[in-house]
Amino acid sequence: MSAHDMDELQAVAQSIAEERISASARDGFDTLLQQALRGSLVPSGADAVITAVEVDDLAEKKMVVLTISSYLFRLMVMFHFTPDAATKGHFARLAGDGAAEVGAEGEQAFMDALAECGNLCCGIFNRELGRFFPHLGMSTPNVIDTQCLHYLHKLRHAHVRHFAIDIDQSPRLHVSLCVSAYDRLDFAVSAEEQADTTGELELF
């Protein structure tokens, strides 16, 4: 089989994968993730603007990846980061102490704070998705190179979105969402459900 034939087969497989998820479900995943981001990455009292961006806008070198899976889909949430002073300062601000100071202990504290924020975000996301899908499971955080984003097409994803988060007195942050669907997905997030996302999060 020629390379051209392989490309055509991959394009057909990708098209089939994308047809499995409705426009309403895409909006639902995006909405619930943005709410989870506001609940985990934005310090108390700060304002944040979240916008969709292209993958070419991502300059970070590393990302923390968490997975939420069900019988119907698998999604990955990717938190992009560069361990510079501004980013460390943001996560120290979230932690409310000097945990992200530079140094051997500071580097580990920074990674711990970043992973904990990822866990919190996906915990909120997982809880809200539980309103629509039973039997959800969540992974532990993994750190990989951001260049791995270029291989997302290998997953034959149904939906991919990249977000920029602009927060007062903090550097711009980027988060990516990738959903692979095993069956047709169609759900809608109502205005009431959007408003009811500030309750206590169960720790695990």
Image: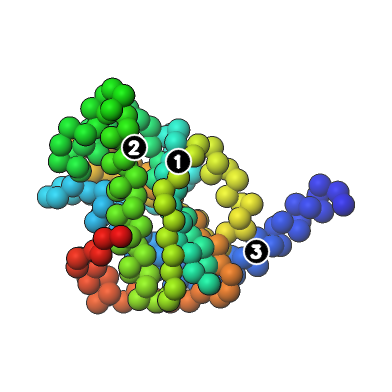
Residue matched to label 1: 143
Q: Residues within 10 Å of mark 1 (few under 14, many from 20)?
A: some
Instruction: Report how far apart the C-alphas of labels 3 and 1 lie in the structure.
Output: 30 Å
Q: Residue at x 28, y 27 (%)?
A: 105
Coordinates of residue 166 in the picture (x, y in percent)? 27, 44
Q: Residues within 10 Å of mark 2 (few under 14, many from 20)?
A: some
Residue matched to label 2: 111
Coordinates of residue 97 in the picture (x, y in percent)? 15, 36
- Mark toward the start of the polypeptide (1 vs 2): 2
Query: In the rendering, which numbered label is found on residue 15?
Result: 3
Which element type, helix, strand or loop, lies under badge 3?
Answer: helix
Q: Nearer the viewer, residue 197 or 168?
A: 197
Instruction: Report how far apart the C-alphas of labels 3 and 2 lie in the structure.
Output: 37 Å
Q: Residue at x 50, y 36 (%)?
A: 145
Q: Residue at x 23, y 44 (%)?
A: 167
Q: Residues within 10 Å of mark 3 (few under 14, many from 20)?
A: some
- Mark toward the start of the polypeptide (3 vs 2): 3
- Position of residue 134 in the picture relative to residue 181 (left or right): left
